[in-house]
Amino acid sequence: MSETTPPTVEETGAEKPPANNAQARQDFIKARGRRNVMIAWSLVAFMVIVFSITAIRLTQNMAAREAAIVEEESDESLAAE
Amino acid sequence: MATRTNIAVTGNTASSPAEWRDYIALMKPRVMTLVVFTAFAGYIAAPTGLHPVMAVISLLALAMGAGAAGALNMAYDADIDATMRRTRLRPVPLGRVRQEDAYGFGLVMAAISVLLMALASNYLAAGLLAFSIFFYAIIYTMILKRRTAQNIVIGGAAGAFPPMIGWAAASGTVTLDAVILFAIIFLWTPPHSWALALYKAGDYAAAEVPMMPVAKGAKRTRLEILVYSLVLTPFALAPVLTGLGGWLYGAVAVFGGAIFLLLAWRIFVSRAGEAGSAEEGALYAVRAGDKAARDLFAYSIGYLAALFAALIAEHALGAYAATPLGGLL
């Protein structure tokens, strides 16, 4: 069985922290943490938006269907008379 | 010279790692503001509307789409941005955001914005948004900008789409009124951009971008600014003829247009653009001979904002009063 090695940082193209300066490395890690928090908030916002769209569309479609049923029933009652 | 692929490595060294604010800067927030404003005017002026939450999401999607186009533009233009005083502090030439990250950010934002627009409004608005992003990032940025002095004339269409998208989002259609709003911004873009290019010509020449003052000279640019202004200002009255604009819009178009023409004439009779590059510093910093160009550039932003603010006031705040000319078109 062939052994697979995980890709290196260079191979994935991911940004890597500076290796030669402890302060720069700390700053890099903190900035990356703040970016990750913003990405998390953005994902939450995206979920809320999609949920809102779904809820509104569902409500509108249900209302339209009810209106269509009422109209159909009134047409039928008129035809019966 | 730094190439487009190694700009973040060989250009200015980043003083600190990328923050989330750098990604906001990639989206050109000032441009986004004008995009959202004109799109809102198009949305409000349309005869039908959306659920308020859907309308807000549609405008958010449009802002994200504009931001995505801005990020793709900054990613591709990193090499020329690094040579221009006005743009060298952007995140990619500064090395704060890597070029490939800017491309990735722009593409992801573009996809999300079009998806949200399709979900919140309709496929026509989503299709127009996708096309406008494509037009700005590919047609303007990658094809026209470095090849022709007419770059901003054709590329200006990308910036003219927002009110049409707002209209399409609200009504699901594109009518003559929506096309007129598109055309107003389309005609406004050349005098606005060339006024800036006149007093930043040195920057564009250094970056080898063939803006009109660089490719054809200052005199020809001043003439073209006047010609476009003579076309734009009467055309801005077209909404009055269709009934889209009332007395308020008509007054803003007449008086605002008269001042626009006056400033364009001042440029025409000035020697703007012949003093060389602008002074070091801010967007509005100019040499003495270029003040007429700076004045039109600054005023043109207010003029466009005033036209669309009048439409918003008439259609959203009840200030509409029909003119006798309404319905002629």
Image: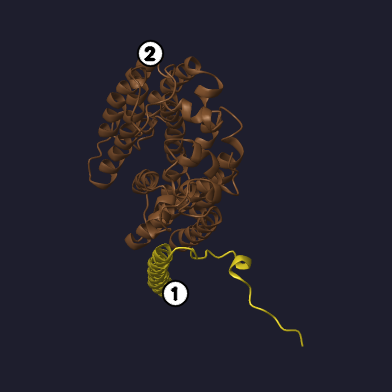
Residue B164 showing in the rendered view: yes
Tell me, for residue B243, which label it has, or none. none
On the same chain: label 2 and label 1? no
**Label 2 is placed on what type of residue?**
Ser
Give residue B194's quadrant in the image. top left
As drawn, the residue found furthest toward the top would be B269
Locate residue A14, reporting x and y percent: 55, 65
Which colour style is shown?
Answer: by chain
Chain for numbered disc 2: B
The letter of the brown chain is B
Q: Which residue is mark 1?
A: A76
Q: Is residue B245 above or below residue A10?
A: above
Q: Nearer the viewer, residue B51 or B53?
A: B53
Locate residue B239, reporting x and y percent: 37, 33
Chain for numbered disc 1: A
Q: Residue at x 46, y 16 (%)?
A: B223
**Label 1 is placed on what type of residue?**
Glu
Q: Which residue is mark 2?
A: B270
What colour is chain A? yellow
Q: Nearer the viewer, residue A30 or B51?
A: A30
Q: Is residue B108 above or below residue B213?
A: below
Locate residue B41, reporting x and y percent: 34, 44
Q: Secondary structure at mark 2?
A: loop
